[in-house]
Image: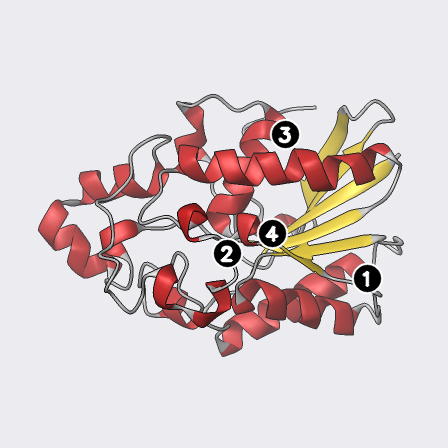
Amino acid sequence: MNYLILVRHGQSVWNLKKRFTGWVDVDLSDKGKLEAKKSGELIKKLNLKINNFFSSYQKRAINTLELILNTINSKPTQITKAWELNERHYGELTGLNKDQVKKVYGEKKIHIFRRSWDMAPAPLNKNNPNHPLNIKIYENIPRNKIPDTESLKDTYKRVIYYYLKNVEPLIQKGQNVLISAHGNTLRALCKKLFNISDKNISRLEIPTGNPLLIKFKNNLKIDNCRYLDSSRSKDLLVKF
């Protein structure tokens, strides 16, 4: 038996302000830092040796992971940072306040943008300072790989390609893996792992700072899964 732990980063400063964040590199809020530390405390109670650590390129995921590592007193030789694990790109919605956008587009349309499988907002102008092309941490990513907007389906393609190539082989070898990433990154990954339909994926929510523990059998089949903080768990739309 071996394990995969998925952690959505703690609340970010733009989460707090209800702004669409996507690929913009914002840090954790004070609450988010506490959520990350709480994640570490929950993981520490498992008394589980974790062999591999992954995060996106974005500081809210990286700092969440670092706070977890400090809490569990672990100093891994390597943390793998992958842009493929970045949050979904929200296109022209990036940086806008969610409440204000609802007044313009209507709540139903915004829900579709946020939760649907294959609907993407209009592209973000490449001259916008919030476009990934204009954010320094992405300067080493091939320009043709940097999106102007994404649906969850688009996000799924890059996340799952990376997972199958870089993470699943480690699990197959019997190693334990922790991934610190984002709401839509983890929704995409759970869609794959739990075989959630295109229709039902709109119902899946991933809470911040609440580790999801997935236990695998030797054949890569999932034995069971649970949120470590049961008081803040969400429906995973799957039964084992």
| Gap in angstroms between the C-alphas marked 2 and 1 | 34 Å
Among the two numbered marks 3 and 1 on one chain, the one whose residue lies closer to the N terminus: 1
Residue 124 appears at what percent x and percent y?
25, 54
Q: Residue at x 52, y 39 (%)?
A: 158
Tell which of 138 and 34 is nearer to you.
138
Among the two numbered marks 2 and 3 on one chain, the one whose residue lies closer to the N terminus: 2
Picture disc at residue 141:
2
Crowding at label 3, few (<14), some or many (≥20) Cα neighbours within 10 Å? some
| Gap in angstroms between the C-alphas marked 4 and 1 | 18 Å
**Residue found at the far left of this picture:** 104
Q: Please identify the quarter of the rendering in which residue 61 is found.
A: bottom right
Q: Is residue 164 left or right of residue 100?
A: right
Residue 132 appears at what percent x and percent y?
38, 61
Given contact means CB atoms under 8 Å apart, are the residues at marks 2 and 1 in contact? no
Among the two numbered marks 4 and 1 on one chain, the one whose residue lies closer to the N terminus: 1
Nearer mark to the viewer, of 4 and 1: 1
Among the two numbered marks 3 and 4 on one chain, the one whose residue lies closer to the N terminus: 3
SS category of the residue bearing label 4? helix
Q: What residue sits right under mark 1 in the picture?
A: 44
Compared to 51, does 24 lie above or below? Answer: below
Q: What residue sits right under mark 4 in the picture?
A: 231
Given contact means CB atoms under 8 Å apart, are the residues at marks 2 and 3 in contact? no
Nearer mark to the viewer, of 2 and 1: 2
| Gap in angstroms between the C-alphas marked 3 and 1 | 24 Å
Given contact means CB atoms under 8 Å apart, are the residues at marks 4 and 2 in contact? no
